[in-house]
Image (spheres, grey):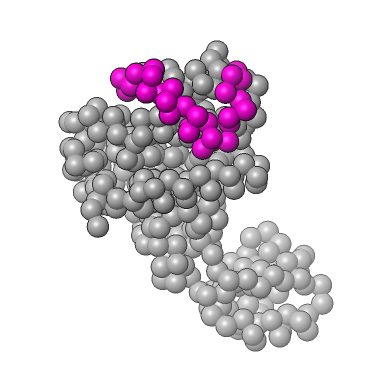
């Protein structure tokens, strides 16, 4: 496979704070690659470095076979960006937002208009062609931002938390559209705080914390390599005390958060038999998932 984005020993500091600490990263053509991490992990700075919006202190970076930031402007002609916060022009209609954005790439109005209906249908916004942006729902604005990122028919699309703040219906529609893009051979670089989103969409993932990549692989590989196969969540006021006295007997590892004890096991049979004999406790038995991996690697403490 051919790497469409590659970084080697990439480093960026602001004063004495190291934000990106010598990372190596490779994104293959046609895949959806997820960059995960808590707030302050260095994800957004990494995206800005890849786009050539800021220069690294050291390291090498290539985007679409061009060195960045030296030839970032030439590379960005073939890039689409869905920013974390919508920056649509509120004075324009849906169609006008697409038209004006296309002009930034030197695309003629005739060429944009020829693709307009395709873009509107992709975003499920055909009926909103002449609507002003302030009249759109949050989901419609996100879909318009995605459609706008496709105006120049890019090879690579950067998506910074594309479904934050959306209801489940809007999220699922955007997921469907992103799958369609990878099916068409587009390369996606995705940051998200929704672990189910990353697990559903991404072919490969990198977990980032304190400016470093601490684990990388497919969602299944990350789960298999970093966490036990099953999780039993034990709820109730007595859960913390129960965990102190009993969890280590049944679980390979356990954590207590509030009134919930998280027990990580490879075979939950004996633990569940024990819990069924306990009063005042409720439990949920489930397979381990990407969120469990994320919390194990980066911790449960809040990041400000």
Q: Classify 164 as above or below 274.
A: above
Q: In which image quadrant can residue 272 be found?
A: bottom right
For residue 268, what is the image quadrant? bottom right
User: How far across and down, in percent of the image, does residue 150 sit?
Assistant: 41, 33
Check the image and report above or below for 25 versus 154: below
Q: Is residue 100 above or below residue 179?
A: above
Q: Main secondary structure of the magenta part?
A: helix
- Point out the stretch of residues depicted in magenta: 105-132
Q: Does residue 268 appear in this view?
A: yes
282 relative to 212 in the view: left or right: right
Residue 192 location (% of width, % of height)? 49, 46
Choose between 211 and 102: the one closer to the eye: 102
Q: Nearer the viewer, residue 212 or 255?
A: 212
- State how many labels appear: 0
Check the image and name the residue furthest to the right.
279
- With 58 as the anchor, is 246 left or right in this view? right
- Indicate the quadrant where residue 151 lies: top left
Residue placed most toward the observer, 173 or 302: 173
Image location (x, y in percent) of residue 93: 55, 18
The residue positioned farthest toward the top in the image shown:
91
Left or right, 7 with respect to 249, comes to left
115 inside magenta stretch: yes
Residue 25 shows in this picture: no
| Residue 210 screen position, x and y as percent | 38, 48
Q: Give me the residue at 53% from left, 15% from top.
A: 92
Q: Residue at x 38, y 39 (%)?
A: 157
Which residue is at 48% across, 32% downward? 119
The verdict on residue 303 being magenta is no
Residue in view at x 58 percent, y 44 percent: 173
Give the quarter of the figure containing the N terminus. bottom left
In the depicted view, which residue is nearer to us: 164 or 200? 200
């Amino acid at each position: 496979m051919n790497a469409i984005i590659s970084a080697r020993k990439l480093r960026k500091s602001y004063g004495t704070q190291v934000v990106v600490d010598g990372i190596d990263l490779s994104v293959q053509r046609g895949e959806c690659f997820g960059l995960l991490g808590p707030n302050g992990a260095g994800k957004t700075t990494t995206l800005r470095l890849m786009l050539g919006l800021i220069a690294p202190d050291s390291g090498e970076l290539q985007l679409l076979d061009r060195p960045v930031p030296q030839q970032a402007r030439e590379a960005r002609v073939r890039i689409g960006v869905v920013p974390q916060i919508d920056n649509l022009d509120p004075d324009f209609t849906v169609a006008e937002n697409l038209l004006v954005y296309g002009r930034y790439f030197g695309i003629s109005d005739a060429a944009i208009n020829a693709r307009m209906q395709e873009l509107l249908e992709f975003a499920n916004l055909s009926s909103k062609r002449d609507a002003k942006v302030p009249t759109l729902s949050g989901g419609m604005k996100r879909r318009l931002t995605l459609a706008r990122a496709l105006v120049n028919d890019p090879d690579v699309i950067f998506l910074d938390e594309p479904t934050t703040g959306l209801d489940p219906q809007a999220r699922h529609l955007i997921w469907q559209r992103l799958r369609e893009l990878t099916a068409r051979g587009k390369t996606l670089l995705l940051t998200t705080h929704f672990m189910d989103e990353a697990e559903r969409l991404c072919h490969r993932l990198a977990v980032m914390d304190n400016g470093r990549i601490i684990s990388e692989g497919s969602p299944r590989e990350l789960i298999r390599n970093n966490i036990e196969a099953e999780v039993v969540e034990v709820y109730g006021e007595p859960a913390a005390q129960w965990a102190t006295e009993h969890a280590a007997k049944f679980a390979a590892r356990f954590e207590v958060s509030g009134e919930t004890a998280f027990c990580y096991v490879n075979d939950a049979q004996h633990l569940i038999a024990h819990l069924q004999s306990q009063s005042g406790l409720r439990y949920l038995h489930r397979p381990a998932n990407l969120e469990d991996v994320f919390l194990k690697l980066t911790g449960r403490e809040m990041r400000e």
